[in-house]
Image: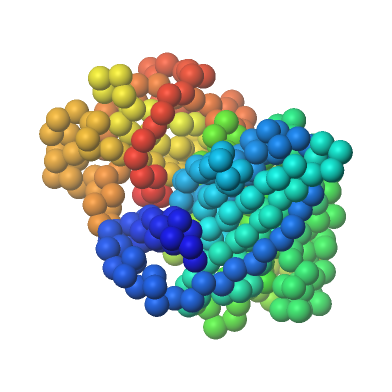
Amino acid sequence: MAKEEDDLWVGAMRTLLRRTTGTRGWLVRPTSKLFKTVAHELDLALPWPMDAVTGRVESVLTSMSQIFDHPAQSDTERCRIRGIVAGAIKGGMPVVVTVDLSPGQAGGTTLKLRAAAKGLIANQRTAEKAAQAVARRLTQPDGMNGTFAAHTWFEFDPSDAAEMSDAELAFAAALRAHSSAWTPTDVDGDIAAFAADGMAEQPLVAYVSLIDPADRGRFLLHAGVHLLGDRVRGDRLHSQLFSLPECPSSWALDSVGTRDQLAELSTHWFRRVLDKPIVLYVWLHDGYAYAARYTFADTAETLIQCYTRELAPPGQAEELIAAGHVHGRGWIQTVGLPTPSCYLHIRGDLTKGTVLPGIPATTQRGPISGLWYEGQ
């Protein structure tokens, strides 16, 4: 990796370690030199002018950063945009994507797209799949007007087909058939041939990734199903490992049946998950947002949250910790906070949920700084 790529990768790995282990990742930089760089490059041509394509590239890279929450960086002098995307089924391996733009024919734009990762942490296939995923987003026919192209739900990479049995391929095909009438949306639905959940037998995983439609870089959660034999289980999935939780949620799926029955049950379950109402609660102090929490309004389940001690009322963090409102290695839980200052309706049918009483609704959102982490 070039120095700029390496610096970005190191920062992303530190973010990943903070989120998964609570450590600061000071050893990432010295050890990064020990890992070989794996990269994949693509050439693209888009029929739109450079200024429009520039905005499109920035939006796509930011939306694909997921847990890294990293906005794309633009170098106007070199016509280069660089960002971090979450690569591989685990969803947490950082891949540095660099896009160089130049004028193309007939007013269009040509792009050289490079996806780079670190060996031992990822592999060549990780970089290749990340590059292809970015390219697919960039080439959506109606991507330039801010809407989403109609796409086939629950697709899988052709290279994964070799790892799937005939029964799993049939299940994936049935999922696509049952969801074919769904309208275009901001949600992606995919199939993976494996999941790193430590099981002796690896299940087929189908999942959707929920984001905040008004803040496309804000990843909320993966929800998906594990198919193993004649049994399917569905729930919130681990953000990196895609494993199921030890304690099922109130909206979990667990059924047995034929392949067609399980595909139909899974499709109905996915639809219910996509329709679940989500709200964002925000806490303000001295005009700044010091804490925020995305929540399922029907079950009050926290999706992700953040708490910034430097912006919070003096002494509050210590009080929360003393009261036990802390998890893991210092993740302060927003459930211990007083009444939120306001809330925003993010997605889903809010009439099917309940908002905390006495809190004003708002549609305006200012900046919310801090590290986001999953709720308890």
- Residue 215 spot, x, y in % from top left: 54, 34
Q: Nearer the viewer, residue 339 or 151?
A: 151
Q: Nearer the viewer, residue 196 or 94?
A: 94
Q: Residue furthest bottom?
A: 200
Give above or below for 347 relative to 109. above
Query: In which image quadrant can residue 115 be found?
Result: bottom right
Residue at left offset 31%, top offset 24%? 288
Viewer can see residue 154: no
Residue placed most toward the observer, 310 or 296: 310
Foreground pick, 4 / 162: 4
Relative vertical location of residue 16 with respect to residue 278 in this rendering, above or below = below
Which image quadrant for residue 76? top right
**Can I make out residue 115 in this image?**
yes
Residue 80's spot in the image, x, y percent?
59, 46
Q: Is residue 89 above or below residue 103?
A: below
Q: Position of residue 33 (x, y in %)?
A: 39, 73
Residue at x-position 71% and y-position 79%: 163
Please indicate whether residue 176 sits to the left or right of residue 366 in the image: right
Residue at point 44%, 76% (across, down): 35
Q: What residue is rendered at 27% in x and 45% in y?
A: 332
Question: Is 191 left, or right, of 180 in this rendering?
Answer: left
User: How many badges with numbers are in the image?
Assistant: 0
x and y percent of residue 27 in the render?
A: 29, 68
From this view, report whether residue 145 is shown above or below residue 65: above
